[in-house]
Amino acid sequence: MLAQPQIKRTARGIVLLALLLTLALMAVALMGAVEVWSFERQRETEAELLYVGDQYRLAIEHYYYATPGAGKTLPASLDDLVEDQRFPVPVRHLRRAYADPVSGQAFELLRNGEQISGVVSGSTKTTIKRSGFSRADSAFEGFETYNQWRFLFSPPVAGKSSRKLPSPLSHPPVASGGKP
């Protein structure tokens, strides 16, 4: 009769061991899932940084070319991009001043004297993307940290042809040579 309690204890021990082994396997699987999620989250943040940085670069470029007259200027502050007061009706080159998606802080400003020529992330985290950038971001090829990605607008050198951005009210050009 003493054999039965011994078997019950052994069976309980095996069940406990199986439960611990199952929990350990679940923990390893969960760690793998968290690692994959973290990697995907960084990829999304990186894509957001590229998008927001390009928005700043395009806003600075639009501000520059929208400057009335021959003396083109760059914005003095981000507020100038959000609400350009140089016109009778304020112009918005940027919807709002975006935060750096990687650091969560404000972008660091790249200045040309007192004027803003671009933005850069303050993060020194290592990038995932090292190649396959768009033409506008092709200078980022091979860079290893986010603070090396500089979203910069360089005004054209004097004497070279300057690009004129269309007015929001202008119509696209009509192709000629078509049938009447």
Image: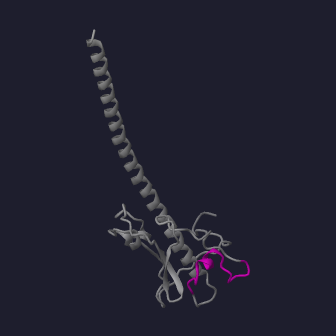
Q: Residue 163: x percent and y percent?
A: 53, 80
Identify the residue at image location x=59%, y=79%.
63
The residue lying furthest to the front in this view is 2
Residue 77 vs 100, above or below: the answer is below
Q: Is residue 4 left or right of residue 139?
A: left
Place residue 7 in its image quadrant.
Answer: top left
Q: Is residue 40 left or right of residue 89?
A: left
**Is 151 or 144 nearer to us in this picture?**
144
Q: Is residue 72 left or right of residue 36?
A: right
Q: Residue 173: x percent and y percent?
A: 61, 71
Residue 109 vs 127, above or below: the answer is below
Residue 1 drawn in magenta: no
Place residue 18 in its image quadrant.
Answer: top left
Residue 25 vs 16, above or below: the answer is below
The residue lying furthest to the top in this view is 1
**Which stretch did the figure color magenta?**
73-89
